[in-house]
Image: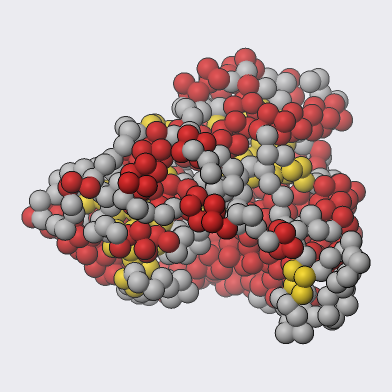
Amino acid sequence: TRTIEELSPWEDARRMLVKAKDEGIATVWDRLAEQTPHCSFCDQGLTCNKCVMGPCRVNPKGPKRQLGVCGADGDLTVARNFGRFVAAGAASHSDHGRDLLEALEAVSHGTAPGYAVRDTDKLARLCAEVGIATLGLDAASQAKALAEHFFEDFGTRRHALSLLSRAPKKRRDIWDATRSTPRGIDRECVEMLHRTHMGVDCDPVSICLHAARTALADGWGGSMIGTELSDVLFGTPRPATVEANLGVLRADSVNILVHGHSPVVSEMILAAARDPEMLAKAKAAGAAGVNVAGLCCTGNEVLMRQGVPLAGNHLMTELALVTGAVEMVVADYQCVMPSLVQIASCYHTRFVSTSEKARFPGGTHLEFTLENARDKAREAVELAIEAFTRRDAGRVDIPTTPVSLRTGYSNEAVIEALGGSAEPLLAAIKIGLVRGVVGIVGCNNPKLPHDGVLTGLAKELIRQDILVVVTGCATVAMGKAGLMTTEGLEQAGVGLAEFCSRFDLPPVLHVGSCVDNSRILALCGMLADALGVDIADLPVAASAPEWYSEKAAAIGLYAVASGIMTHLGLPPNILGSELVTGLALEGLEGVFGASFVVEPDPVKAAEAISRRITAKRLALGLND
Ligand code: NFS
C-alpha cells in the first residue's frame, strides 16, 4: 500500500485523506488497492463480451484459446474494444454538445426562460462562418438558423461536418484520402457500434481508422459545437483572476459544489445562488451567504466565464465532501463518481442529480429541463440552505488557503491579449523565443501520483520555452503548482518569460473545459493557415498525462488524427495486440503525420515532446 504522501502532493488532499481514514470513509484510492492486480486479459484488451457465445478471453500466444468462439483473434478483439471505447468518449462529448444545441434552439423559440444569447457577436460570426446570411435577421432568428444547421451535423449530413473548414486544406485532403473525414457526428459513433458487432468489420486496421474518424467527429464536431454554443449562450471567456483548491469553501457560508460538465445546469445554479432573495434566506438560516464552487469540467466552464472558484479536480471530488463543509453537490453528467452519493450520506451533504440521463440512486433527483431550470435551480439552493442548518460544525475542516490563477483564455481573448492578431505569437515561434505550444489536458488517475505527471511535465516544458495551454482537470493542478499567474514565469525559460511578460500572460494558459480542447484544434488550424502549412508541420504537441476516461481516449485520438503528436501517461487497454499497439505508437505517423507516445515519467515525456518540437522547427527552417 502507498502512503498518503505518495498519493497526493497537496496539503488539502493529504489532510482530507487523513480525515477520511479517521472517519472510516473509503476513497477511490482504497477501491483501486482492492481491485489491484487487475485482470490481465482485460488490462490488455483481450476480453470480449460482445456476444453470448462468449464471453471470451483470447490468448494470442496460445497454445489454447488463441481465438474467441466466433474466431476473432487477439488483434481483432483489441481493435473492437478500442473502437467502442473511443466511440463512447466521442458520444459523451457530442451528446453534451447536443444539449447546448437544444438550449440554443429553445432560446430561439423563447421556450427557455433564464437562458439567452449573451454573445450576439459570436452568434453572428458563427452564422457567417457556416454560410447563413445574417442581414436583417435578429438574434433569435440567427439562433434558430444556426441550431438547424448544426443539427444536421449531428445526424443527416452526408459528406463532411461544417466546422472542418477550420482545418487546413492539406489536413482535409489527408482525411479524404484515408477515408477518415467525419460525416455525421452521431453517424460515426453508430457506425462504430455496427462495425464492431460480431461478423462486421474484421480488419483491425480498418476499425482503428474508423476510430480516428469517430474521434474527429468529436473534436471538430460535437465538442467544437459544444464550446462555440456555450460561448454564445453564456459569454465568450475573458481573462480574469480566480481562486482554487479546497480553501475556496467557506466555513460561514452555504457551500454548493457544481460538478459534471454542462454549463446549462451550473450557470442556472449560479444565477439562483446570486439572487438577493436566496441570500436573505441563507442569512435567515444563519449563514453569511451562498458560496458556489466548481469541480471538474463544469467547474472549468463557470470558472472561465463567471470567475467561480474551483474547489478541485477529479481526485478531489470525494475529498471535497470529507471537509464536512459542503451542503450540496449538484451534478449533471460525466466523471461524477457514484461513490459521491455514499460519501455525501456520511455527512449532512445533499447529492443532487439533475439530468434525465444521469440518475444516482440514493441522491435527490431534481430533473432540470430548459423550461424549468430556473425554478429547479432555486429549489436546489433552498435545499442547500436547509442542509446548512444540519451541518455538524465539529466535523468541519477546510484545509489550506486558496491559490490564485488566471483564466479566461478563449482564442478570442488570446488574440486580443496579443494586440488583435496571432502574429506576435507566430513571430515569437519563428525566432525561437517560444519554441512551441503544448496542450496538457484531461483527468487524474489514481494509478498515478495525483497531479504529479501533469505538473512535472508542465514545469519541464515551460522551462524549455514551450508555451502550455491547459483544460479540464489539468487546470487546478497547474494552479496549485503556481504556474497560472505571471509569478509562474520565474519557472519559465528566458525566452518564454520574455514573450509572456510582454503580453502580461502566465506561462500556462487556461483555455477551458475538456470540450474546449476544440479551441486548441481551432487555434492550431489558425496557426497552420497563417504559416501556409499543415497542423502536422507545427511545433506543437498534446498530452493527457493522467487520463482515465473514454472521453480522453477520443481526445487523444482526434489530436493525433489532426496531426498532433500526443503523449499519454499510461496506455489504453491495447497492449494485447502488437498490431494495434504498433499502429498507435508508430503506424499512425504514416497515416496522419502523428502518433502516440506513452511515458509515465514527466521528465522523459518532456524530452520526447521537446525532441518532436525541435524536429518540427528544423523542418520549417527555424532555428532551435
Ligand atoms: Ni476531461 Fe477527464 Fe472529466 Fe473533465 Fe476531468 S476527468 S476527460 S478533465 S472532469 S472530462
Q: Quadrant of residue 579?
A: bottom right
Q: Which residue is drawn at 72% across and 31% down?
A: 604
Q: Is residue 308 at all visible to an observer of this figure?
A: no
Q: Residue furthest left?
A: 284
Say above or below: 604 vs 98: above
Q: In which quarter of the image is residue 617?
A: top right
Task: Using the image as rendered, state which of residue 480 and residue 542 is in the foreground.
Answer: 480
- The picture places residue 310, in percent across and down from the top left corner, at 39, 44
- The picture places residue 173, in percent across and down from the top left corner, at 85, 55
Q: Which residue lies furthest to the top in this view?
A: 494
Q: Is residue 609 at all visible to an observer of this figure?
A: yes
Say above or below: 51 vs 177: below
- 149 on left or right of 608: left
Say above or below: 247 vs 553: above
Q: Which residue is drawn at 50% across and 62% down?
A: 334
Q: Which residue is drawn at 23% across and 45% down?
A: 396
- The picture places residue 255, in percent across and down from the top left corner, at 26, 51
- 179 on left or right of 91: right
- Quadrant location of the C terminus in the rendered image: top right
Task: Using the image as rendered, state which of residue 5 and residue 393 is in the foreground.
Answer: 5
Task: Using the image as rendered, state which of residue 188 and residue 447 is in the foreground.
Answer: 447
Say above or below: 137 vs 583: below
Q: Which residue is drawn at 59% across and 17% down?
A: 498
